[in-house]
Amino acid sequence: MMPKDKLRQLTGDERLGQMRESEYLGAEDIDDDVEPILTISGLWNGTVTLQRGKENKDVLTFAEERVPGIRQVRPLIINATNRKTLRKLFGDVKASTLVSKQIQLYIDHNVRDPQDGGKTDGIRIRPFKPRVQQASPVPPCTDCSGEITPAFGKDARWVAAYTTKNYSVPLCAACAQKRKEAEASAPVPPADEIPEVPAPDMPEDGGLL
Ligand SMILES: [Zn+2]
């Protein structure tokens, strides 16, 4: 039975916890097995509203709006553990030191829950500088020779990998759309060759980096 509320069905790589409406980044916002890398854009302090009430907190904001592993980047409340990690990493925790620095996040599954003393998930900062990603350059589009740019809410590398998987060659989103339309208007192939409509089995971001 469907409720009367207007719900949107999640498909493909959308997952539970991801559409959470919160002002601040939480463990639910980070995909499994991805350690997002973020660039600090600002340090803030003030009274933040938490489930358990209002508390004075330090907060980091980030330059990125979306990175592999986080669909919507939000500000991160900095607890004592993460503050110590930042100090270890960069020598001090001054705004002049931290702004524009990159950090790598991961989920610690053994954080003590301040509510009930049990275990919960928490966002932690890796005590090392993000590994330089030796990613090969994104190839140009085979059809128009243009640059492959981010599309479908994914980065250019993902678009190149996705189109290569579906069309055997890297394509920009516009050319992939043209090929799709051309296929659609082509004579109908035998039933067992009909391509599946927008493939939900997209490659994982993490595997592409
Ligand atoms: Zn193209």
Image: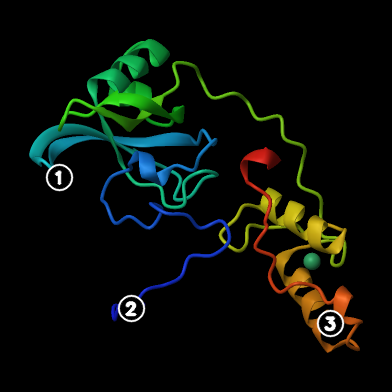
Give, as a three-letter code, the residue at label 2: Lys
Depth order, front residue of 75/2? 2
The answer to the question of whether label 3 and label 2 lie on touching residues, with beta carbons closer than 8 A, is no
Residue 182 numbered tag: 3
Q: Nearer the viewer, residue 48 or 28?
A: 28
Q: Is residue 116 left or right of residue 153?
A: left
Q: Position of residue 49 (x, y in %)?
A: 13, 45
Identify the residue at horizontal 44%, vertical 42% (top origin): 30
| Circles 1 and 2: CB atoms closer than 8 Å | no
Which image quadrant is residue 100 in? Answer: top left
Residue 151 higher or lower than 45, as above or below: below
Crowd class of label 2 (few under 14; some 14 to 19; many from 20; radius 10 Å) = few
Horizontal placement of 125 versus 165: left or right?
Answer: left
Front residue of 198/1: it is: 1
- Which of the 4 image quadrants contains residue 149? bottom right
Q: For mark 2, what is the residue? A: 6
- Specify the label residue 32 is tagged with: none
Identify the amino acid type marked 1.
Gln
**Of label 3 and label 2, which has the lower sequence position?**
2
Instruction: Please tell me whether mark 2 sits on a helix, a strand or a loop.
Output: loop
Q: CA distance from mark 3 to mark 1?
A: 52 Å
User: Does label 1 or label 2 sit earlier along the sequence?
Assistant: 2
Q: Residues within 10 Å of mark 3 (few under 14, many from 20)?
A: few
* Residue 88 position in % (x across, y down): 37, 11
Q: Which residue is labeled 1 in the image?
A: 51
Q: Residue at x 45, y 35 (%)?
A: 39
- The secondary element bearing badge 1 is classed as loop
Instruction: Assign a secondary structure to mark 3.
Output: helix
Rendered-image quadrant of the C terminus = top right
Residue at horizontal 88%, vertical 87%?
A: 188
Q: Calculate the distance from the C-alpha at mark 1 to the C-alpha at mark 2.
A: 25 Å
